Image (tube, rainbow, N blue to C red):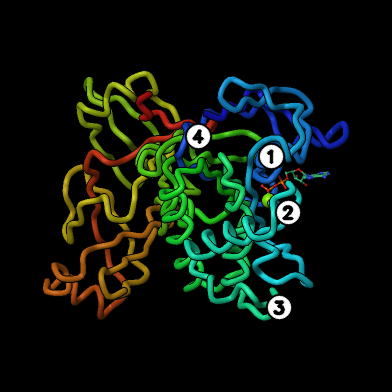
Amino acid sequence: MIRVEKIRKEFGKNAVALDDINLQIEDSTFIALLGPSGCGKSTTLNCIAGLLEPTSGRIYFDDKDVTDLPPKDRNIGMVFQSYALYPHMKVIDNIAFSLKQRGMKKEERHQKAREIAKMLRIEQYLDRKPSELSGGQQQRVSMARALVKNPKILLLDEPMSNLDARLKIEIRDEIRRIQRKTKVTAILVTHDQEEAMSMADKIAILDKGKIQQFDEPQVLYNHPRNLFVAHFMGNPPMNFIDATVEEKNGKLYLSSPHFHVLIRENMRKFLKDSVNRKVVLGVRSHQVDVSFGAKESYIPVEVCMVENLGKEIMISGYVGESFVRITLPEKIDTESVAMQQLFKQQEGTIYIGLNSAYNVFDKESGLNLTYAV
Ligand SMILES: Nc1ncnc2c1ncn2[C@@H]1O[C@H](COP(=O)(O)OP(=O)(O)O)[C@@H](O)[C@H]1O
Ligand SMILES: [Mg+2]
């Protein structure tokens, strides 16, 4: 287990890169540190690696305090965005380099390099120089170099950023396969939420040097703790609609000049103390019921565009000032007359109903009021 306890990192007086970072990472799991550029992902990773010294806080591997240990004594492997291979060395010697430093005999270290190269499917390139390899192959070499020492922890800092889209997906699968096989504990830094979602067992979302939420991908997607996480997770992004919580005749509503939606019993407990509070309704594009006629408790959407994306139909429009996107399964809906008309005219009004899968955020603090701990 890796424990990061209350890590703070300052670069000079007024530059706080990390502010009270806490993480517990179980052995053999795959973790992603996700967030926008400059949020502190690499700084966190480099503190865990020992490349940076935290201003305060401690880091433990199992029960051992490693905060003051140099990187070479931490039993870690690292892979960076720039592959940083030695250009004058053959691939096999690049992979085996750290073993040479440890004093391992040539035959033995080459044997180990060949084994790991086989696992990464690069054994046919071992006699080449790095410049004679493609970007994807170079990335595999840098993975092999990190893994050859049989590290307990693998740290990956945006390792796929320099690869084209197709190769990215291939390497994603490859990294995950190898992590499962070697059971190494892996921490991936990325700004790409799709990459994090597809690879990680758990994701820590950072913003401004603070962890916003550390959870399984599905939990982040369905139950974001605040507006930042909600904005960051999912494509298309969650829809956000301004509203106020209102009470009338003992019933609660989400209200605005454009709609009046009854809050059902299952959500009532979260919102009963928020009467008159300005809130943001957050609902995903596919988690609404769509009607072509007005219905009680439905929200009218002024449609401005309808697109057929193949597997689904995307309807874009406005609720007041709020831009929303609704997706519908293609099969069901191209058949209906109302849908065909909407397609033809590219405008009109549809009505969306909320099922139970929605979130309500406090507009001011951004906190999810419907977040059940
Ligand atoms: N060596 C450094 N000196 C001064 N500021 C730094 C240094 N490294 C990082 N920072 C600052 O710390 C913050 C976090 O940086 P970083 O961890 O690299 O972000 P990320 O990897 O999430 O893009 C940024 O504001 C960055 O400018
Ligand atoms: Mg970085």
Is residue 229 visible in the rendered image? The answer is no
Q: Which one is in front, 8 or 73?
A: 73
Q: Quadrant of residue 62?
A: top right
Q: CA distance from mark 3 to mark 4?
A: 41 Å
- Residue with the mark numbered 3: 131
- Select label 3 or label 1 by which is in front: 3
- Residue with the mark numbered 2: 100
Q: Tag 2's secondary structure?
A: helix
Kindly tell me whether mark 3's CB lies below 8 Å from ligand 2: no
**Earlier along the polypeptide chain: callout 2 or callout 1?**
1
Q: Which one is in front, 273 or 355?
A: 355
- Horizontal relation, residue 122 to residue 280: left or right: right
Residue 259, given in percent of the width and then of the height, sits at 30, 44
**Earlier along the polypeptide chain: callout 3 or callout 4?**
3
Q: Are marks 4 and 1 in contact (CB under 8 Å)?
A: no
Give above or below for 30 relative to 86: above
Q: Residues within 10 Å of mark 1 (few under 14, many from 20)?
A: many
Q: CA distance from mark 2 to mark 4?
A: 41 Å
Q: Are marks 2 and 4 in contact (CB under 8 Å)?
A: no
Q: Residue at x 56, y 30 (%)?
A: 2
Q: Given the image, on which type of amino acid does mark 3 rest?
A: Ser
Q: CA distance from mark 3 to mark 2?
A: 22 Å
Q: Tag 3's secondary structure?
A: helix
Give above or below for 74 relative to 194: above
Is residue 21 visible in the rendered image? The answer is yes
**Earlier along the polypeptide chain: callout 3 or callout 2?**
2
Q: Given the image, on which type of amino acid does mark 4 rest?
A: Gln
- Horizontal relation, residue 44 to residue 27: left or right: right
- Residue with the mark numbered 1: 49
Quadrant where the C terminus sits is top left
Q: Quadrant of residue 12?
A: top right
- Residue with the mark numbered 4: 213
